[in-house]
Image: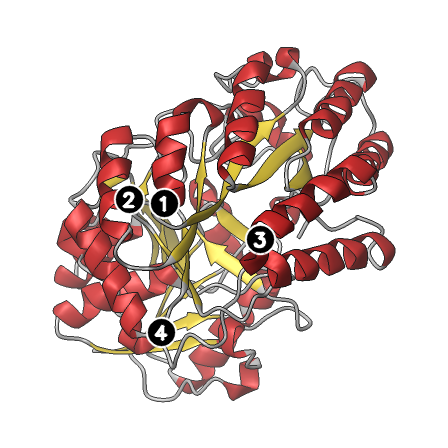
Amino acid sequence: MKILLVNPPRVNGIPIIREERCEIIERNSIIPPYSLLQIGKILIELKHDVTLIDANGENLRFKDIKLDGYNILIFRFTPTTFDHDLKITNRFRKKNPEGIIIGICFTLKTLWKEIMKEADLDIFITGDYEVVIKDLFTNFQNYSNIKGIAYKKNKKIFHNEYIRNGFDYDSLGIPAYNLLKNFNFYKINANTNEIFSIIYTSKGCPYKCNFCNVANTHLKTKSVDLVINEIKVLKDYGVQLISFFDETFTLDRKRVLEICNNLKYLNIKWYCNTRVNLIDYELLNEMKRAGCAGISFGCESGSQKILDICNKGINLKDIEKAINFCKIIGIKTYCAFIFGLPGENKNTANETIKFVKKLKPNSAQFNIAVPYPGTKLYEKYSRDINWKKLYQDEALISLCELSIKELNKIRKKAYRNLYFNPFWLYNNLLFIIKNPYETKLGINYFLKIMKNYFFYRMEKAH
């Protein structure tokens, strides 16, 4: 079959990330459509004729996407860009009346009934796409046997429950990077002109944070050999900078050390995400020697009360220790915080603002609590929200005693208190002096912050 994979266009010129937990509007980053590349690899191995169009990366419009002559369309969408992204379905139907349309949205997978009612989809994937796609295209004529999909038959909607029991990540191999035109479109946050890509070494997280839609999910890991081979392939494409997109990169300390031992010889710079209680000085030192330039930590709050309520499983000393270790070793720190979690009040919010001012990470992101489908918060607040507006830049409803207006004011105050703190400016200038190769990135990042503050009034985290 002829299959078209599409990452839909940007929204009013603003890039969108449509990758698993990161289905967000992101004006400062453009990343490769990793999941579609992985799907492409699976379909090519099943002997299908596959084309990928990254309209977001290439900044194409809908009318620029050639849709003629395909049997199947597979595309990703996000909650906040739902109506925009679904335009591709109408255009595809007109060109291919007998074609089949398959949609993927990680954030909305538990809302399959609502999605299938509103969207012109034949199939909506609700399980791990890595497993479901292979099962589906191995037995395409009989949907009733495929676990992890919602589908339409005779104008009725059906759903086959998915059993989460993991899968052999190595069996997927290296994504079909050859489906991309090139990597010149992609950049991370503050652009440094380094050719960039993301990569997963694992997926899933065993922790149980009540606000997270990846919480308590089965962990799947690639072997170290496959990870290193994939990075070598990316280097052959000219990639110089990688973001390990794992939810929690350092879950397995021994495995990370083994990856680092191999990375030392590849001369590549990289970033990762992890928890503050899953690193130590020795590990960070090895990561730095292996090319780690920055780490994103989910800190969530500067109030121990809020950390306990949201079941984060860390304490404030863990956060301080992790950030201080990174400063000593020379790894940039990016800290994510959430205002408005249950139990939040003016006192706890101000605790967070003071804590961040004291912490002085290289950068911070302040989000508003959102009850995402599949989380404990959603179970409690689902009646009050519009799933098309699920985005952490904007408060939909208040989950605490603070009003939406108060939460937005607190968020802006947090940005002001960090980025206009003379000690924060001094620390970052000192970091650049010690690491002169970071000068361009530092300047670009500072300009981005100023643009966000003076142009968007810090109403956009991204």
Disc 2 to disc 1, C-alpha distance: 8 Å
Disc 3 to disc 4, C-alpha distance: 27 Å
Residue 39: image quadrant is bottom left
Amino acid bearing label 4: Gly
Neighbourhood count class around disc 4 (C-alpha, 10 Å): few under 14, some 14–19, many 20 upward:
some
**Residue at image x 84%, y 59%?**
455
**Residue at image x 41%, y 84%?**
67
In the rendered image, the vertical position of residue 233 relative to residue 24, given as above or below: below
Q: Secondary structure at mark 1?
A: helix
Q: Secondary structure at mark 3?
A: strand
Task: Looking at the image, tell me whether mark 2 or mark 3 is earlier in sequence order.
Answer: 3
Q: Position of residue 120 (x, y in %)?
A: 47, 65
Amino acid bearing label 1: Arg
In the rendered image, the vertical position of residue 426 relative to residue 230, given as above or below: above
Evaluate whether residue 249 shows in this view. no
Q: Name the residue nearer the viewer: 182 or 322.
A: 322
For disc 2, the marked residue is: 260
Residue 289 image label: 1
Disc 3 to disc 1, C-alpha distance: 32 Å
Task: Looking at the image, tell me whether mark 2 or mark 4 is earlier in sequence order.
Answer: 4
Q: Are marks 2 and 3 in contact (CB under 8 Å)?
A: no
Residue 24 image label: 3
Amino acid bearing label 2: Cys
- Horizontally, residue 422 falls left or right of residue 448, namely right
The N terminus, quarter of image = bottom left
Task: Looking at the image, tell me whether mark 4 or mark 1 is earlier in sequence order.
Answer: 4
Depth check, mark 4 against mark 1: the one in front is 1
For disc 4, the marked residue is: 238
Task: Looking at the image, tell me whether mark 2 or mark 1 is earlier in sequence order.
Answer: 2
In the rendered image, the vertical position of residue 369 relative to residue 226, given as above or below: above
